[in-house]
Image (cartoon, rainbow, N blue to C red):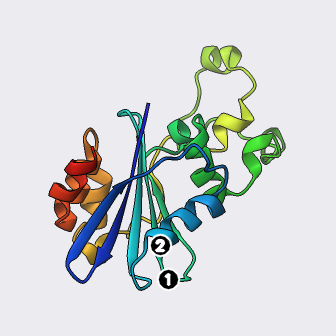
Amino acid sequence: MYFAALLARTEDGWEASDTELDDVETLSDLTELAREASVDDDTVIVFIEQEDAWFGLLRIEGEDDPRIYVSDGAAAARSSYGEILIKELLGDDLDGDAPDLDALDLDGTEDGEPLDQEEEDEEEAPDVAADAVPAAPIGDRLVLADLGLPEKELLALESDALAEIADALGAAEVLETVR
């Protein structure tokens, strides 16, 4: 189950609106939805959360390119709305055109820990699509730094992240009204 909301900054503070993502198929659709909510090309933040598996932020300011942050790339890549954000961050390589990891001659020792012979024998061919997306935060980690949520705090968020983000922005009450 998804939760999505738009927060638009105005002269009077933040205005929140519940967002329906049914018609969103591309990043352009999501960006257009956010720009429609903007007042005088002010900042708009789109929150997308899939239960407690991952959350994503899309920040729009005027006609600038969107800034994107996703809390867990691999989890988001397994969902339709997360995939929209991931494709923008990593390119269209999620549909099977990912780099050929076998050609890179990766043997598992790249992180400095050699594989045991048993582990090497048990190892199967990597799932290219899964390996193409890290199970870690990806995107613009400074997406909200100027609004009161520094990178370190953003990376530390886990469950109920959107409430903590809204609190840091001074928008907790308006976000709660649409939840």
x, y percent for residue 27: 62, 59
Q: Residues within 10 Å of mark 2 (few under 14, many from 20)?
A: many
Residue 28 vertical position relative to residue 3 in the rendered view, above or below: below
Q: Which mark is residue 60?
A: 2
Badge 1: residue crowd in 10 Å (few <14, some 14–19, many ≥20): some
Q: Which amino acid does label 2 sit on?
A: Ile
Mark-to-mark CA distance, 2 and 1: 6 Å
Amino acid, disc 1 = Gly
Please tell me the numbered disc located at residue 33.
Answer: none
Assess whether mark 1 and mark 2 are in contact (beta carbons under 8 angstroms). Answer: yes
Above or below, comparing residue 50 to residue 168 in the picture:
above
- Marker disc for residue 62: 1
Residue 75, compared with residue 67, is above or below; it is above
Q: Tell me which corner region of the image, top left, top right, bottom left or bottom right, holds residue 133.
A: top right
Is residue 131 in view from this perspective? yes
Residue at image x 27%, y 47%? 161
Instruction: Give the x, y percent position of residue 101.
Output: 77, 42
Q: In which quarter of the image is residue 81?
A: top right
Q: What element carries label 1?
A: loop
Looking at the image, residue 67 sits to the left or right of residue 101; the answer is left
**Depth check, front residue: 67 or 27:** 27
Q: Please tell me which residue lies in front, 102 or 83.
A: 83
Task: Count all numbered tags in the image, as a single digit.
Answer: 2
**In which quarter of the view is residue 29 placed?**
bottom right
User: Residue at position x 62%, y 48% from top?
Assistant: 23
Residue 162 vs 150, above or below: the answer is above
